[in-house]
Image (tube, grey):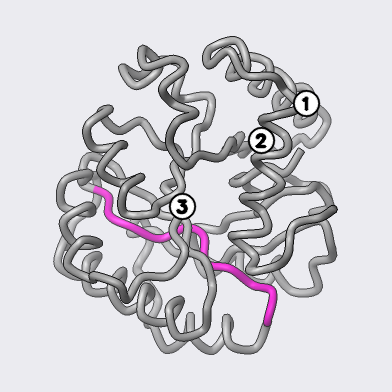
Amino acid sequence: MFDAHRHFSSAKACANALYATSKTGEWGRLKGMHHPSVGGIGALPEKPLPTAELLYEYVSKQADLQIAEVGLDRRWPDAEAQQLFLLEVLDIAYILERSVSLHCVRRDGLLLGLLKRQGKHLPTLLWHGCTLSWESAHQASRMGIILSFAPSLYTSALAREGKRLVTLRYALETDYALEMEEPYEAYLEKHLDAFSELTDTSCDTLIRNNDEIRAILTNQPSAR
């Protein structure tokens, strides 16, 4: 199954997954990735943010590179710089027709408002690790944002919505970040089974849905 968001381990990136990065020091690992792996260039405010020009240079040179992950995080200072960087990256993604995986920590309303003000000039968006309130999740879905559910969903209030979750545009992700690669497949399967039980949706349906999301995020036709 396609994993809509994970991170690198010590092993070579070869899983059917979108590999996200959070700082410039990881960008080098995105070069030369091969199908079924997808690379995502990103930067979070835990470290000094790069210039948008540098990110543009990387993305424009690799036709299959997506943007993952960027966003807003209340834990780190300079909220204005975070917003300006995000707006610049959204413009880059829109121009280059790349998808963007959004990171958001305790800035849900601010991020939704920012995206709404962008109007139709938005790239394909995925809300990574979505644990929004039902009202905010529904609002994001109406804006065309793909809501990506990680195992963190199960300890959030959003998990109470059960079957209603699959009425929204959604994806499944592991957000896997361990150095050891060996537990990954079991971790992914456990998440798939848990979400299947929570939403009363067959695993086959969830797998097909994630394959369709992969096609949307990479701007490629679905596999037949």
Can you give x and y, in whole percent of width and height, for residue 94 in the image? 43, 78
Mark 1: amino acid: Pro
Can you give x and y, in whole percent of width and height, for residue 64 in the image? 69, 74
- Magenta stretch: includes residue 66: yes
Query: In this rendering, would 47 be left or right of 25?
Result: left
- Magenta stretch: includes residue 129: no
Which residue: 29% across, 42% down? 105
Element on which disc 1 rests: loop
The residue that disc 3 covers is 126
Element on which disc 2 rests: loop
Can you give x and y, in whole percent of width and height, for residue 168 in the image? 43, 36
The residue that disc 2 covers is 178
Mark 3: amino acid: Leu
The residue that disc 1 covers is 183
Which residue: 65% across, 65% down? 218
Front: mark 3 or 2: 3
Q: Are marks 3 and 2 in contact (CB under 8 Å)?
A: no
Image: magenta residue range: 63-73
Kindly indicate the quadrant of the structure image that contains residue 117. Answer: bottom left
Query: In this rendering, would 53 be left or right of 207?
Result: left
Local packing at callout 2 (Cα closer than 10 Å; few below 14, some 14-19, many 20+) is some
Residue sitting nearer the eye, 136 or 65? 136
Can you give x and y, in whole percent of width and height, for residue 166 in the image? 49, 28
Total number of numbered labels? 3
Give the spatial CA distance, label 1 vs label 3.
25 Å
Decide whether the magenta segment is chiefly helix, strand or loop: strand
Mark 2: amino acid: Leu
Element on which disc 3 rests: strand
Query: In this rendering, would 192 be left or right of 68?
Result: right
Quadrant in the picture for the N terminus: top right
